[in-house]
Amino acid sequence: MRGGDPVTTLRILNLNTGKVVEAVVQTPGGEVTYDGLARIDGVPGSGAPIVLDFLDAAGAKTGRLFPTGRRTDVIDGVEVSCVDFSSPLVFVPAAALGRTGYESKRELDADPVLKGRLESIRLQAALMAGLGDARDKVLPKIALVAPPQGRGVIASRYFTPWNCHSAFAVTGALCLAAAASTPGTVVHRLARFDRDDPALVTIEQPAGTLDIRMRPAPDSTAADPVFAAAGLVRTARRLFQGMVHVPLDDHFEAA
């Protein structure tokens, strides 16, 4: 089967969430290409760009964008936002825990007091969101958020969930972008959008930056946004290549 020219759009069903992802793959002349100049911070080298658009990703695990029914909640005296967009996350302002939100992964991993407070908040948020006892579960994830230091929209440190990760997972980044784009969340209060391109959410993280583009639905409003899709660019990489050699002897005949 040959692809389109110059690109092929694939529709992928995510069995974990029941949601659809569209992948736009570079296929010049109908053949997949891996070569390209697209780069991702934290990933070595470059490759052909693959655009991933996550469609109707709100409530992927819990059925609601805000699984507690509120855009903010107070847990352990800290105002947080529980958001479910592609994946459920709990967002905590770093300043509320006495941190800047710009610490390195090494600094955060070596901070047992902070990690203990984050885990307490995460476990309580899981119960409030209807996700049950999360002591031995990785969902919901949790992230610290802060105003951007550079040209980004939001700075964040993502935990998976017991250690800081140098880069956001795709689903976590999508959730952060949705939270940043929704008034009333703790993330939106800290976000600094480009007035000329408010749909672009650039995340500052330890590994660099990551761009998410939000696509509002036709019935979306500024106060109550609805997202038809959220997209980002990944790169094509050949995972492995192999050849099978079949000996031709008395038991085999050439086709």
Image: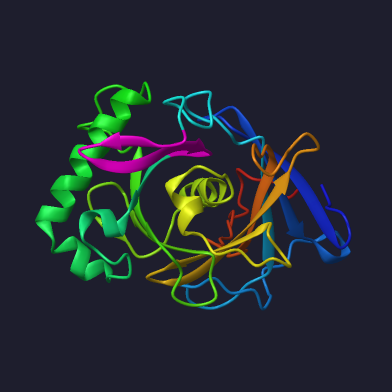
Q: Which residue is more in the foreground, 208 or 48? A: 208
**In this figure, which colouring scheme has been used for the structure?**
rainbow
Tell me the quarter of the picture where residue 222 sits.
top right
Q: As drawn, is 101 to the left or to the right of 23?
A: left
In the image, 191 versus 30, the foreground residue is: 191
Residue pictured at 21% horizontal, 63% vertical? 108
How many numbered marks have been drawn onto this rendered protein structure?
A: 0
Residue 136 at x, y = what percent? 21, 32
Is 18 covered by the magenta stretch?
Answer: no
Position of residue 5 measured from the top left corner of the image (x, y, whole percent): 89, 60
State the extent of the magenta-drawn residues as a range: 71-88
Question: Left or right: 104 with respect to 192?
Answer: left
| 86 relative to 114, above or below | above
User: Residue 193's x, y, as percent?
Assistant: 60, 63
The relative height of residue 78 versus residue 40 in the rendered view (above or below) is above
Return the residue nearer the eye: 100 or 33. 100
Who's the residue at 66% across and 78% down the image?
Answer: 37
Q: Which quadrant of the structure image shows residue 21?
A: top right
Q: Is residue 122 left or right of residue 211?
A: left
Q: Which secondary structure type mostly characterizes the magenta part of the structure?
A: strand
In percent of width and height, residue 201 lies at 59, 60
Residue positioned 21% across, 69% down in the render: 106
Q: Is residue 84 magenta?
A: yes
Q: Would you place residue 28 above or below residue 181 in this image? A: below
